[in-house]
Amino acid sequence: QVQLVESGGGLVQPGESLRLSCAATGIIFNINAMGWYRQAPGKQRELVARITALGGTTNYADSVKGRFTISRDNARSTVYLQMNSLKPEDTAVYYCVAGRFGWDHWGQGTQVIVSS
């Protein structure tokens, strides 16, 4: 089994930055990719960013391109989401995900609130 533990959420003002972290433990050798989803109240869950385990290929939702950066530290089995120039519409619960051919594993979520 794989366990994903997120950290780094919080309350920030518009324009500020946050960095989310997700540490993976357990049987992780067959994970092909990791990523971040988010879900705001009353909205559908959205894939924000993803990164492949070996090649480091990244993909982003249009809504965060140029502001968010996903990265990984394979030695620590950790993936990060650097979020800059945060907007109120970025407010959501952010979930770390990982999997082989799909998103088989989900973290418990971390709350991000962007408000003045």
Image (cartoon, rainbow, N blue to C red):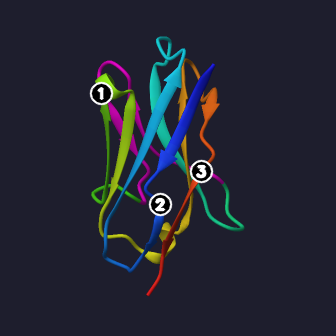
The location of residue 77, given as percent across then percent down, is 39, 27
Q: Quadrant of residue 110?
A: bottom right
Tell me if 19 is positioned left or right of 29 in this view.
Answer: left
The location of residue 81, given as percent across then percent down, is 37, 48
Q: Does residue 29 sit above or below 33 in this rendering?
A: above
The location of residue 97, given as percent across then percent down, is 55, 36
Element under disc 1: loop
Element under disc 3: loop
Q: Nearer the viewer, mark 1 or mark 3?
A: 3
Element under disc 2: loop
Residue interval drawn in magenta? 45-63
Tell me if 42 is positioned left or right of 33 in this view.
Answer: right
Residue identifier under label 1: 56
* Image quarter of the N terminus: top right
Q: Quadrant of residue 102?
A: top right
Crowd tier of the residue under label 3, counting other residues whose Cα lies within 10 Å: few below 14, some 14–19, many 20 or above: many
Q: Is residue 39 magenta?
A: no
Decide which of tag 1 and tag 3 comes sooner along the chain. 1
| Label 1, label 3: how far apart the Cα atoms are | 23 Å
Decide which of tag 1 and tag 2 comes sooner along the chain. 2
Q: Quadrant of residue 4?
A: top right
Residue identifier under label 3: 109
Q: Does residue 81 sit above or below 88 in this rendering?
A: above
| Label 1, label 2: how far apart the Cα atoms are | 24 Å
Q: Nearer the viewer, residue 81 or 52?
A: 81
